[in-house]
């Protein structure tokens, strides 16, 4: 019989590649920011027309006209945002970074309010600490804006690559493929049946 489990060395190799990319990204945050913004723009250029086509193709009885009109408008905004991100990636990354800063502040405030109003099964202090860190990070990004628009997204992508690389290496070293994130379940289902 054929062993359907991937070799632990594949997990380690994937983890090392992600770690190398993450470390490289720490030295090239501006390039990673622009590349990430371009990729996001391409995704918006695909999502916009897909949203419009799906809304137009929807049967009239199944959805009210105002809901379809809103989806067509959203698809147009996706497409316009995608064009902006592809043709003006630096300006788009600066705009996205400002939005990111405000979102971090808002999520930190919401998390703090939630932790104080609801019973927390884990440590309330840990949830409040995470909330404070989110608010401070968002405030630091906004305080350094527009310059933070040149490095913040690239830094976050690099940190994500480092975390994913560590996760995959850990999965390979411990021979516990469940530690390699939910993606492992998807990859495993693609194997022989």
Image (spheres, grey):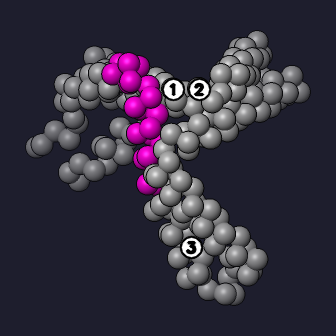
Name the one closer to the observer, 48 or 11.
48
Q: State the residue position of label 1.
A: 151
To which quarter of the image does residue 67 belong?
bottom right
**SS category of the residue bearing label 2:** helix
Q: Which residue is mark 3?
A: 52
SS assignment for the magenta stretch, majority: helix
- In this orientation, which residue lies closer to the viewer: 8 or 20? 20
Identified at 32% across, 26% down, the residue is 21
- How far is mark 3 from mark 1, CA to CA? 33 Å
Q: Nearer the viewer, mark 3 or mark 1?
A: 1
- Magenta-drawn stretch contains 167: no
Which quadrant holds residue 59?
bottom right
Residue 134 appears in view: no
Q: Which mark is residue 147?
A: 2
Question: At 73% across and 81% down in the image, what residue appears?
Answer: 65
Is label 3 in a helix, a strand or a loop?
A: helix
Cα distance in 3D space between marks 2 and 3: 35 Å
Q: Nearer the viewer, mark 2 or mark 1?
A: 2
Quadrant position of the N terminus in the picture: top left
The residue that appears at 76% across and 12% down in the rendered structure is 125
Measured along the vertical axis of the image, is residue 89 above or below residue 25?
below
Q: Which residues are magenta?
A: 22-44
Residue at position x 67%, y 82% in the image: 62
Q: How many marks?
A: 3
Image coordinates for residue 38, horizontal then vertical, percent: 44, 46
């Amino acid at each position: 019989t054929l062993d359907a489990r991937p070799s632990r060395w594949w997990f380690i190799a994937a983890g090392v590649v992600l770690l190398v990319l993450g470390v490289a990204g720490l030295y090239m945050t501006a390039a990673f920011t622009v590349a990430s913004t371009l990729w996001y723009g391409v995704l918006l250029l695909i999502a916009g027309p897909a949203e419009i086509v799906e809304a137009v193709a929807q049967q009239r009885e199944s959805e009210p006209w105002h809901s379809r009109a809103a989806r067509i408008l959203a698809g147009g905004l996706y497409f316009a945002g995608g064009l902006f991100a592809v043709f003006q990636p630096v300006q788009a990354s600066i705009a996205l970074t400002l939005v990111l800063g405000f979102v971090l502040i808002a999520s930190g405030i919401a998390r703090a309010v939630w932790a104080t109003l609801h019973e927390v099964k884990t440590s309330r202090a840990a949830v409040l600490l995470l909330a404070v860190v989110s608010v401070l990070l968002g405030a630091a990004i906004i305080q350094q804006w527009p310059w933070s628009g040149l490095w913040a997204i690239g830094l976050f992508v690099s940190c994500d690559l480092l975390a994913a690389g560590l996760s995959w290496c850990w999965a390979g070293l411990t021979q516990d493929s469940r530690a390699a994130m939910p993606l492992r379940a998807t990859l495993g289902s693609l194997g022989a049946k």
